[in-house]
Image (cartoon, rainbow, N blue to C red):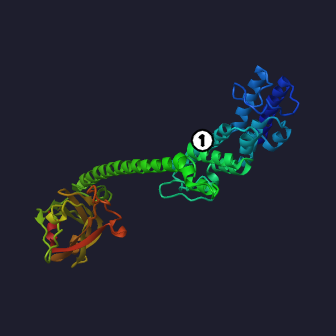
Amino acid sequence: FEERVSDMHDELSYLLLEGIISERGDNDVLSSDDAKEDENGLDGGGNDTELGLLYRMKLRYFLSWPNAKIRSHRFLSSLPSSFLREHSLLLGRLGQHEDALRILYCDLQSLELALEYCDDRYAREQLRLDQEVRSQRINNSPMRSPYRGEAMDRNGNARRKQRDCAYLPLVRVALESDPDSDRGTAAAIQVLALRSGFIDRSAALRLLPQNVPVSAVARPFLIPALVDCESQVRRLTITSELLRAKYVELKRALTDAQIKSQSSLKAVPALRSLNLGEVIQSSKPFKARPTHSASSTFPDVTIQKHFFRRFLVIQAKVTNSAVSLDGRTLGDVAFVVAESSDEAILPSSQVPLKALPPKSTGSAWCVLAASPQRLDGTAILTCELRYTVLAVDTNTGAPLSFGGASVSTGLGRTYVEELQDIEVRHAEFEM
């Protein structure tokens, strides 16, 4: 199929070329008029008829089409030497960008055409990059650079190298190929000034001759580039703050939803999956007290026991109300049964609170597997409350983390508070 498409595209290219030649009687000699653009912006079109100009425009459009499957080497060997723009387009398809720009800048003596060539190349590269990044995100594939051999940064942006800058070849051509070195340097500086937002600035400056005075590039390039960079820093700073505020807002909404989903026994998804059965009875809530002197960050904790035929579920209602916390969020709040005095009641699983904002109340759960028939007398449960005081952003007051990874990343201090023992009796598993 690819061969058939290439054959068809080659045939179309040759037909358009034949139409141009037949309309102008081309003798393959580049006259002085051929090196100039006509009123339609077509160089080499001075001898073309109206139909010939139409053929030429269609040929150039086809050669510049990224999806064209033309055999560029073969067509280039058949192209008359006076077809300079067509030569540059074919050289560009072959990746010989400096040779293509040398035709536009030196032979046609048009910096405007050379810049237009670079602009088209830059637009195609950006489109290709955007499409590949979008495709990777849709397919959830690992983020890699569409540019071979390049890495991606943590934001999914390609680290661009010199060879990827569409405008650097033009700077090199102007400096190396112009017989008038002063004019070539001036043209290179003009390229820097006109495309300062898209060119690799540091690489372009390194290409300039060492004898070029700073004053020659200060006004047209350095000062505007500095102003643009400062403006970009301000824009990115504002954007970052807005995105951070939106992130904090969404995380708080998610935290509120998680707290609500863990507020009652029947609402907790992790407990529903255990098939606990029907509740036999629930004890009266009582306030948990620390075994030793509590830390200044210790929250209010209320305990309630829920008895099932084969399970004991302990609900710890935690209120983030400590004055010393100064409005800081608690993360990874977990009620833990560290030890049981009787093997008839053993810890099974926990459902911690990922985050508990200031003045909020949420429930942490602990599930114990129970065998009431094997329980003699009273079982003593040694309990702990574990939580992390999350660090906050000094500018916004928002948590730097919302739990989960706070301990491993060092974004807060973790506390383990020993609570008074809880007693469990055999009779409590009966109505």
Left or right: 241, with 174 as reference point: left
Residue pictured at 60% horizontal, 47% vertical: 189
Q: Which residue is mark 1?
A: 123
Q: Amino acid at mark 1?
A: Ala
Provide residue 51's location: percent of width, then percent of height. 77, 21
Left or right: 321, with 330 as reference point: left
Left or right: 74, with 375 as reference point: right
Provide residue 79's location: percent of width, then percent of height. 83, 37
- Asked whether residue 197 is in view, the answer is no
User: Dot 1, crowdedness within 10 Å: few (<14), some or many (≥20)?
Assistant: few
Provide residue 312's location: percent of width, then percent of height. 22, 66
Q: Nearer the viewer, residue 362 or 185?
A: 185
Of helix, strand and loop, which one carries label 1? helix
| Vertical placement of residue 25 versus 346, above or below | above
Residue pictured at 64% horizontal, 55% vertical: 207
Quarter of image, res 57:
top right
